[in-house]
Amino acid sequence: MEKDLFKPIKKYFEEQGFECDGEVDGIDLYMEKDGQAVAVELKVSLDFKVVMQAALRQKLVPYVYIGTFAVRNTRSALFRDKLYLLKRLGIGLILVTKSTKAISVLCDPAEVDLQDTSSSIRKRKHLQREFSGRRTHLNTGGVNKQKLITSYREDALLVLNALAELGGQGSPADVRTRCGVDRALAIMYKNHYGWFNRVGTGSYSITEKGYAALEEFEEVLYMMLRNKKL
């Protein structure tokens, strides 16, 4: 599965000083270091679909890899043709050995000069804002139907925790002061996750879903609060 590729590749780049996270605007593994952005698309086998996905990522990220499991024979004609195609497209290739999780970088990506469109510029800015706005990097790339720890969910959790510290009910101003999230009122008003309940003018309380979320995301909250104190 793609998730089995994620940890060894993430570790490889973290050891090089990259800050990494999974599932950033749909990118399996996204990372930054010294202003340089890199993306990795994960696939259990090197097929046309992942090559197409990687090529499309080049519209948003200057350096793109494909991460896949190592094949038995990298000298076969078919594999060498695939590698030739990736080099022509400027896409890097990382192989992961299934048994040992050893990493082999067969080729590094080249920056491809693609003509920017208003859509690609807008998407690239959103991608960068989302990544830089995340306080934790706990997502695993290549996993479907998981609850992603996005910057919005992190803010909502801080708002929820602040409201809990106020006794389970309070005003948006008090919540914002306690947690430091500027959009605290908007988060409680929109109530995207069903965690909040408006109980009167300028007052919100925590729902049963909210209390359940405090337990479900206890580790995420702990990491955010700990980093805040450091």
Image (spheres, grey):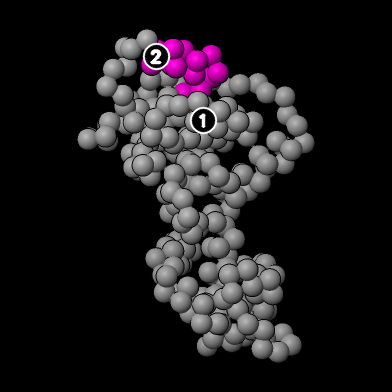
Q: Which image quadrant is residue 121 in?
A: top right
What secondary structure is found at the residue carrying circle 2?
helix
Q: Nearer the viewer, residue 74 or 34?
A: 74
Q: Nearer the viewer, residue 226 or 91?
A: 91
Q: Residue at x 43, y 48 (%)?
A: 143
Q: Is residue 85 highlighted in magenta? A: yes
- Crowd class of label 2 (few under 14; some 14 to 19; many from 20; radius 10 Å): few
When the figure is inspected, residue 203 is found, relative to residue 27, above or below; the finding is below
Residue 140: x and y, percent? 42, 49
- Crowd class of label 1 (few under 14; some 14 to 19; many from 20; radius 10 Å): few
Disc 1 marks which amino acid?
Lys
Any part of residue 67 in sight: yes
The residue tagged 1 is: 49
What secondary structure is found at the residue carrying circle 1?
helix
Residue 221: x and y, percent? 45, 67
Q: Nearer the viewer, residue 143 or 175?
A: 143
Q: Which mark is residue 78?
A: 2
When the figure is inspected, residue 226 is found, relative to residue 97, above or below; the finding is below
Q: Residue at x 54, y 19 (%)?
A: 90
Disc 2 marks which amino acid?
Leu
Magenta region's main secondary structure? helix
Q: Is residue 110 highlighted in magenta? A: no
Count the marks. Answer: 2
- Which residues are the magenta region? 79-92
When the figure is inspected, residue 59 is found, relative to residue 126, above or below; the finding is above
Q: Earlier in the sequence, mark 1 or mark 2?
A: 1
